[in-house]
Image: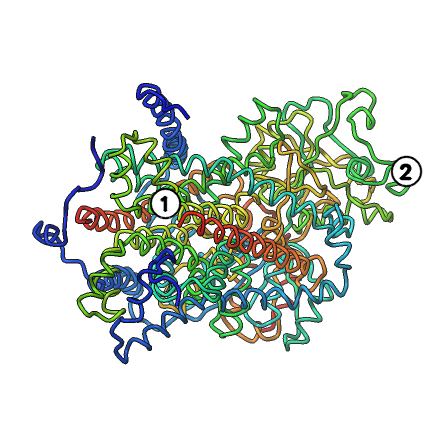
Amino acid sequence: MGGANADGTGAPLASLEAKWVWQPGETLVRTLLFIAAAFAIIATFAIVFALLLDTVIFFGRVSPLDFYTGTKWSPVIDGLYGVLPLIAGTLLIAGGAVVIGIPLGLSAAIFLREYAPARVREILKPVLEVLAGIPSIVFGFFALLLVSPTLKAWFGADYFNATNAIIVIGIMVIPIVSSLSEDALTAVPTDLRDGAFALGATRFEAMGRVVIPAAFSGIMASFLLAFSRAVGETMVVLIAAGENVNLTFDVLGPMSTLAGDIARKATGDLPVGSDLYRSLFAVGFTLFVITLLINLTSDILRHRFREAYD
Amino acid sequence: MKPKSRVVRKAKEAGFVIIFLAGIGVALGVLGVLLASLIVTAAPYLTPTLITNYANYQDPTRAGYAAAIAGTLWILSLTLIFSLPLGIGAAIYLEEYSHGGRISRILQAGVSNLAGVPSVVFGLLGLLVFVRGLHLGAVVLAGALTLTILVFPYVVITAREAIRAVPQSIRDAALAMGATKWQAIRRQVLPAAAPGLLTASILAAARTIGETAPLIVIGAVVLQTFLPYGPDSPFVALPVQIYAYIDLPGPEWQGVSAAGMIVLLLILFAFNAVAIVGRNRMQRMRW
Amino acid sequence: METNEPRSSSIQKGSRKGGVRITTRGIVILLVIILAASGVGAYLAFGNRAPPELVRIDGSSTVYPITSAWAAEFNNPGRQVVVAFSGTGGGFSKFCRGETDLSDASRPIKQSERDACTASGITGVVGFNISFDGLSVVVNHGNTWADHLTVDQLCRIWTQNTSSGACGGAGGQVNQWNELDSSWPARKIKLYGPGTASGTFDYFVEVILTNRRTNDRIRSDFIGSEDDNVLVSGIANDLDALGYFGYAYVVENTSRVKALAIDDGNATNGAGPIFPSEPTIKDGTYAPLSRPLFIYASNRSLGRTVVKDFLRFGFSDRGTQLVGGTGYVSLTPAQIAVEVAKIPP
């Protein structure tokens, strides 16, 4: 058996693990909880199932090679199904968003946990949670009405552009990073901090060299969640990022993403049985695979880091 | 490495504190600008009839959100009732019962993966599985089940952090007292994790209340002149209703939409307030 | 040096503070009470009357204001029409499975969709024309040079084809204003329009490009959006802009955008360039951009009295008045009579 501790360590306590009192009800409880956890897998299979059938039909009519190597996504106008522009757009916008959101979110968490008096924290934390509650359509229009003109004035950006989405999605993920990171920082036992202070560390040094590393896995979890959210964000890109058939890295111009394209097709006027419509399933499936790869990679990396810090 | 003088280190810290403040500052600034512009735009429409009238696409002064508010409350209630036990249960399993082995990593990866699925895909899933597969139709229950799947990974991830924050000494003490694992969890770990679990429910509620695209795909309506009569009733939700107003021609409709956004935020505030008061109470008693 | 949580504390100290005793059960009960209360509240508002007779409408996000206006007045506690807007395609898909009674559509049903209906047992699919949407070609209000365009010129503005045989021989793609008229500015035309998944886009391409008997495709470098208000803003802020959207948005924004008169080169329905307006859209002289909006029914739905009553209400005087209130143009009495005749007794 592995570690008894929540963070997976625990050779010393492994023997304790075996000594929990075991009443008959315990097995039932454990099974029920396992099913709850397995719900994630059930839901994942359901999504794959929902996407796969139409994806397979689609790839029977449009060559997967063209789909995955094509650099122009113009199904309606030109009958071209090259998905690379969408993938590039998704990664660029999500990547840009977390570049903004992660530092700001982590900073907010550090400030709340380490420097803010309890009263201030009690007010600011709920305020940040309100930010989490603002619906994405509000952010979408905020991007167009306030961010876009500013970008146009300062950088000559187009009306619809990728930076609208990058900035706004970045702001949207701040509460995710700050809430989870703050919880992770709180979880670090005070003894660790106290020990650092006893050795003469400043608050900043204690935070940076002791607490944050100890909270590392929780903080990384928040980063990953933020990135996942950014990758899957639909309404903001639909409203503010525009549409672009070409593979481009110009963030001051319009850019299409995988999620945005799916939403456009799912709520548009295209006939449901057509290849045009069916392409949304192939796009959804592609997005799913990309998210899976990102999560698997992150899991492997975290596993490595976890060993290093324990 | 030569240790730096305390003055230098303090100065460095001051510099970073300013950067940390930036994080909060940006968030607050954006929030402030957003709320201010919403309130200004919505001001002429913040009347009682906003809440008591049904939807009206002819006359902005008679437009209201009655059915949408009721629909959102229905969906919010059901989604939380389904997703919180499910998500917290999953978190308990992953944190307390599983041992970091292969299975646990697979389950974990499954949760993270769900978090990255775009909301509209959940709508398509809900349409396939709940509306058609289970023959529920485009009703409240189908919407709630769909949003449950959507919000589930967020609950799990947040609840896991909350449970992880509970000191190991608590569990050890319970073990030493002869408790069963479930007793220890139920009576010691969960109450200790309660503040974080409330955070999880706040974030879940926030996500649920703001989702538009999945509900549109499922078949949330935009014109309904009655309040939902049960889980088997057609429904409209606030974000969908707001979206229906926002696209109408003319500047007055922007005001109606903004007013709807304010109503939505007020509902969120009310929910948050209850949860936060509870959380603060609990947090003051932390060890 | 301060810390943020109490330095020494114990479970005993906590309970001595005399606060709420936390148990998991307590939290769960509290949450359930709160949630149940809101559910009960919502339920009480309706009471335990029997659910109303329901008519479900879904479909185009262009048409819902019309059917919603009808429903709002038609509904009473016993008979309720609900309207959704998951898109013309999504609407037909649900309609063909019998999940909805009527389908709003901004384009005619396609044969493949009809076949899907028949395959699932929905027969006798009939479309009712309920209004006209005058698609207007608009430019920025500060655009002082252009006030009318021919359909051939529109084709050349929007086509992908650069060869001189494009647009049925009218000429290849143009990119600047002065290529259409040498007295106009030598600046690039900035194009705005609905996105490629929208019915409005589909219709525009069909009448401006496909019907010119060319295989011309539309160019893909226009600024597209699903939201017409957004297009209005875009055009209003761009002096070189040219775009198209429904007449209702022109009427509401006359200080920001300007509609151009369109000359379809066909003297029989009005000679010369015609501006979009209620009369010209209604009598068909504003052509070819005046597009019909539809509602579709089937044998199954027309077998229900409530559906027939609803349709008759829509075509009544009051219903016609309501169409006008949405910014779309209603049918002439003669046209209405034709549509009403399709409703079985």
Q: From the viewer's perspective, is residue A139 above or below residue B203?
A: above
The residue positioned 45% from the left and 48% from the top of the image is A308
Residue labelled with disc 2:
C163
Image: C2 above or below C292: above
How many angstroms separate mark 1 from mark 2 (CA)?
A: 67 Å
Q: What is the crowding at mark 1: few (fewer than 14 residues within 10 Å), some, or many (at least 20)?
A: many
Question: What residue is at 77 percent from the left and 33 percent from the top?
Answer: C149
User: What kind of residue is marked 2?
Assistant: Ser
Between circles 1 and 2, the one closer to the viewer is: 1
Relative height, residue C130 to residue A153 (above, below) = below
Q: Secondary structure at mark 2?
A: loop
Q: With A286 as the anchor, is B231 left or right in this view?
A: left
Tell me the quadrant of the picture where the C terminus of chain C can be found. Answer: bottom right
Could you say which is closer to the camera, residue A139 or residue B59? A139
Give the residue at the far front of this rendering: B1
In the image, C276 versus C28, the foreground residue is: C28
Name the subunit of mark 1: A
Give the x, y percent position of residue B114.
Answer: 50, 58
Residue C28: percent from left, percent from top: 25, 63
Q: Is residue A196 left or right of residue C145?
A: left
Query: Going 64% across and 61% down the picture, which residue do you hit?
Result: C128
Label 1: element kind: helix
The reply to whether callout 1 and callout 2 are in contact (CB within 8 Å) is no
- What type is the residue that disc 1 sits on? Ala
Q: Residues within 10 Å of mark 2 (few under 14, many from 20)?
A: few
Quarter placement of the N terminus of chain C: top left
* Residue with the mark numbered 1: A214
Asked whether the viewer can see residue C278, the reply is no
